[in-house]
Amino acid sequence: MANMTQHAREEVTGKLEHVIAFQLRHYRTAQGLSSADLASRAGVSKAMISKVETASTSCSLTTLQRLADGLKIPVTALFRGADTDRDATFTKNGEGSLTVRTGTQHGHEYRVLGTLKDRADALEPTLVTLTNASDVFPLFQHPGTEFIYMLSGKMMYGHGQYEYSMEPGDSLLLDGEGPHGPLALLELPIRFLAVSER
């Protein structure tokens, strides 16, 4: 799949029959099967396989299930690529947009690792780096939930009336409506991944 030709890519982004045609050929040839071999395994005619692989027919779900069984793959694998127009964000190490938030002036860095457009329920992953000890710590409140995963350093983190001693590998899932934020920076630098709903 990683070495798709341009023609194959165009097929995958085309009609459903073309997607199924591409995937069927891909899995059949990857397993070293001839059309006759697959026909025998799946209990369908060689002519039907030819029609499916040339996208000249819309076969039934029963036929698709037989073909998938013959290839020993889930039937959903034959539809892979049918719905490719989905938003995604890829962020290389050290990249991502820096945002200014309460606490930035105290040596706290907030690097947003990606956002999805037009999704009210999208997650917002942020890499937080705390490099300077400070007597003033920002407390946050927001709708939804937040997940924090410690990468390095040590800190006391507060949520509502509770305090958590966090070290690398520790995680905290919290209700964003409760005031939360670092209470004490015990070992610098501190880096943690914060994933929240927007």
Image (cartoon, rainbow, N blue to C red):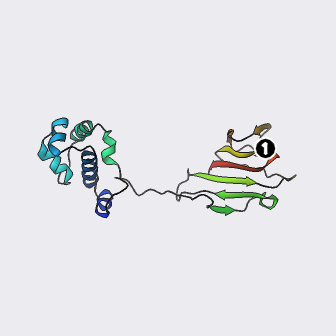
Q: From the top left corner, tell me how far across and down residue 114 is, in percent.
A: 58, 57
Asked if 36 appears above or below 88 in the picture, the reply is above
* Residue in the image at 69% along x and 62% along y: 99
Choose top left, top right, bottom left or bottom right for residue 176.
Answer: top right
Q: From the top left corner, tell me how far across and down residue 45 is, in percent.
A: 12, 41
Asked if 152 appears above or below 106 in the picture, the reply is above
Choose top left, top right, bottom left or bottom right for residue 3.
Answer: bottom left
The answer to whether any part of residue 142 appears in the image is no
Direction from residue 83 to residue 145 in the image, left or right: right
Direction from residue 189 to residue 27 in the image, left or right: left
Q: From the top left corner, tell me how far across and down residue 96 is, in percent.
A: 61, 61
Q: From the top left corner, tell me how far across and down residue 132 is, in percent.
A: 82, 55
* Residue in the image at 31% along x and 39% along y: 73
Mark 1 residue element: strand
Asked if 85 appears above or below 46 in the picture, the reply is below
Q: Which residue is mark 1?
A: 155
Question: Is residue 175 or residue 79 the one in the foreground?
Answer: 79
